[in-house]
Image (cartoon, rainbow, N blue to C red):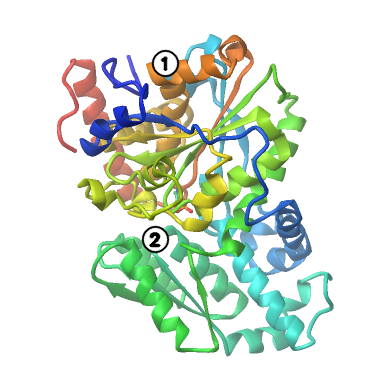
Amino acid sequence: MSRALPPDTPVASSPDALEAPLRKAQPCLWTNPACQAAPAPGALGPAEVQAAAQRFERAAGLLAKVFPELAASAGRVASPLRRTAHLQRALGLDEEAGALWLKCDHLLPVAGSVKARGALHEVLELAERLALAHGLIAPGGDLSALAEAPARALFGRHEVAVGSTGNLGMGVGLIARALGFRARVHMSRDAKAWKKARLRAHGVEVLEHAGDYARAVQAGRTAAAQDPLCHFVDDEQSRSLLLGYSAAAGELQAQLGAAGVVVDAEHPLFVYLPCGVGGAPGGITLGLRQCFGAHVHCFFAEPVQAPCMLLQLRAGLGADRSVYDIGLTNRTEADGLAVAQASRLAAGLMHERLAGAYTVDDARLLCDLVRAHDAEGLRLEPSAAAALSGPLCLTSSVAGCAWLDAHGLSAHLAQTTHIAWTTGGALLPDAEFDAFVQRGRALLAAEHQGEPHASV
Ligand SMILES: *Cc1c(COP(=O)(O)O)cnc(C)c1O
């Protein structure tokens, strides 16, 4: 038996019904009453999403030159879409509840996570802007010349900086270095040691700060503001990052088409996206709502100790909300999702576009990480495993079933496509991954013996 939510999970029947489970860090599902079939135009529109996709196309030749691992795909940055019937069974999702697919961003080249999309786009946009200003390329043209000596000499005088818990720093640092920029990553002191070591091995300067992710971002922002030759990739505010993620939507649409998967009113699409600050899942949701309109329903997955986007959207956009406000710790094994306060940019865009959000505890993350490994041979990090409990959470919880009924979706469940977006894991060192698997197996064994999850 594997249930996303215990049978006694409170129902979101009134706005306040979620207050207690959220405070107690219990898994829950929130559905968004403000979500619209036709949302009002937001801060970023279709033209900007399209421009990001076109930038990736112009950069293909450059990327194939600069990254050996992109030579095989001719510089195209893309991840596989996989039908995962074995994992569907292991997760306990009935055939009548639809079909489970994974969008495997944990296999994305260069960064081994969804961050490759945002980081590549922002560093490419910066490089293009600098090269244009120095007359090294023509507007709207191919970017291959950015691999040549004059461009590299120019980039070597500039620095790219970022504040990060890990994966964004990894993406931005490695990509900036590959194009010839100097790179500096501000991390919280408790960020994983292997990530710091790997960045340093690639010539990235790593600065460590006390406090959480937001403190590292603030420290980086302040330092960068004093240096005109430094570009700061701002995870909490960047439009370029968010647009880089949005380009994934067109990629998925083409893959679904090639696989013969129909998306329409009778064949709805559900997408489950792990959420930290909200840029990656927000950008992808923005793009998906443009591609599929009202037929796609996006849900964010957040740790029980760090449901920052759920809290923000549930409260409305009037005032900033932090997970610390309700006594949560922001501590989780899902380090990519350990964010106390959501991005205002992402929250504003999601207000009318996001179907809902659910929370997952660390025990569930580790169990699902093992299930994905055993059923499909996947190597996910805990953050990515947060996507996997989404389909069951929606289709078997009282709150989820009520929402499906209210939106006329229950009747189409058997023809539903569920896509869990597995956002990272490929770069995890063996020892790290094996340790997660070991802990997950112990939890699963205890679960089979009927014990409740002990502390992780
Ligand atoms: C960063 C990250 C996310 C979430 O992206 P945000 O832009 O922070 O919301 C999800 N999964 C993984 C593995 C990540 O590294």
Residue 154 visible at all: yes
Q: Estimate how packed mark 1 is, as few (under 14), some (14 to 19) or many (20 or more) residues with alpha carbons within 10 Å.
A: some
The response on whether ligand 1 sits within 8 Å of label 2 is yes
In the image, taking residue 115 as reference, residue 337 lies left or right, namely left
**Residue at the image point whose x is 54% and y is 64% from the top:** 238
**Residue at the image point whose x is 35% and y is 32% from the top:** 370
Q: Is residue 150 above or below residue 389?
A: below
**Alpha-carbon span between mark 2 and mark 1:** 34 Å
Q: Nearer the viewer, residue 212 or 127?
A: 212
Q: Percent x, y for residue 100?
A: 55, 24
Q: Percent x, y for residue 372?
A: 43, 31
**Which quadrant of the rendered structure holds the C terminus?**
top left
**Residue at the image point whose x is 40% and y is 20% from the top:** 399
Q: Is residue 211 above or below residue 357?
A: below
Q: Estimate how packed mark 2 is, as few (under 14), some (14 to 19) or many (20 or more) residues with alpha carbons within 10 Å.
A: many
Q: Which of pointers 2 and 1 lies earlier in the amino acid sequence?
A: 2
In the image, taking residue 32 as reference, residue 59 lies left or right, namely right
In the image, taking residue 254 as reference, residue 40 lies left or right, namely left
Mark seen at residue 156:
none
Q: Specify the quadrant of the image occupied by residue 209.
A: bottom left
Q: Percent x, y for residue 18?
A: 31, 31
Which type of secondary structure does the marked residue at label 2 adopt? loop
Mark seen at residue 166:
2
Q: Is residue 263 above or below residue 455?
A: above
What residue type is disc 1 on?
A: Ser
The response on whether ligand 1 sits within 8 Å of label 1 is no
Q: Nearer the viewer, mark 2 or mark 1?
A: 1
Q: Nearer the viewer, residue 434 or 295?
A: 295
Q: Percent x, y for residue 401?
A: 46, 15
Q: Specify the quadrant of the image occupied by residue 19.
A: top left
Where does label 1 land, which residue?
396
**Which quadrant of the rendered structure holds the N terminus?**
top left
